[in-house]
Amino acid sequence: MINYSDDMDLIYLGKVANTHGLKGEIKIISDFDNKEEVFKTGNKIYIANQELIINTYRKHKNYDMVTLNNKTNIDDVMQYKGLNVYFDNSNFKFSLLTDLIGMKVYYEDEYKGIVTEILKNKLYPILKIENKHVYMIPKIPYFIKKIDEENRIIKINYIKGLEYED
C-alpha cells in the first residue's frame, strides 16, 4: 500500500484486461496517447494502491503487455485482473487530450470556434469545434499546425468541407 502525496498527479492509463501466460505478464487495454513513454522499463505504474515498477513492455494485438518487478508468476498478478492502471503525470507532464477542450481554434487569423469535445476512433482523435458551424478536425499533423497550451490556442490548416451543418 502506498501513501499518495499531494504532488502526485495520477492519470488513468487503462485497465488490466487479463493475465498472459504463467510468468506474470499482464494484458492492459489502453488508448492513452503517450503510453509508449509511460510503459518503459523502470517506470512506475499504480494498480490497487500499489506502486509497481515495469520490468518489460511489448505490444500484442490491441494490448499492452507488461511484466512487473518481483511479479514472476501468474499467482502474483492475478489480483490485478479487471483493475484500473494509473501513472504519476507529475513525472512526465503529458498534455492530455481533455486539456484541449475549451481551447480557441484559428485558421490563420480567422476564429473558427472552441473545442467542445474529443471524439475517438481507431485511427486518431477528432476535435469537435463549435461556433457558427461545427467542425470535425482530425488531430493529426496535417490538420493541426500548432497547439499553444500557454495561451490555449490551436492553429489549424483548414480544408474546405470540414464543417458540418445540420
Image (cartoon, grey):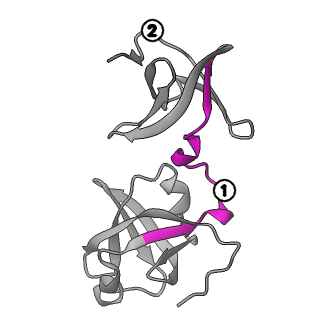
Q: Residue at x 30, y 77 (%)?
A: 81
- Tell me the residue at 38%/57% (across/down): 30
In the image, residue 59 lies at what x, y percent? 37, 57
Q: Quadrant of residue 138?
A: top left
Against 27, residue 119 (above or below) is above
Q: Amino acid at mark 2?
A: Lys
- Residue bounds of the magenta highlight: 85-106
Q: Nearer the viewer, residue 44 or 136?
A: 136
- Determine whether the residue tagged by mark 1 lies in a helix, strand or loop: loop
Kind of residue at disc 1: Lys
Is 148 on the left or on the right of 132, as rendered? right
Q: Quadrant of residue 18?
A: bottom left
Which residue is at 40% across, 11% downward?
161
Give the camera-side residue of 9 and 23.
Answer: 9
**Which of the marked residues, 2 or 1, is nearer the chain's N terminus?**
1
Q: Nearer the viewer, mark 2 or mark 1?
A: 2
- Asked whether residue 90 is drawn in magenta, I would say yes
Q: Which residue is mark 2?
A: 160
- Residue 93 image label: 1
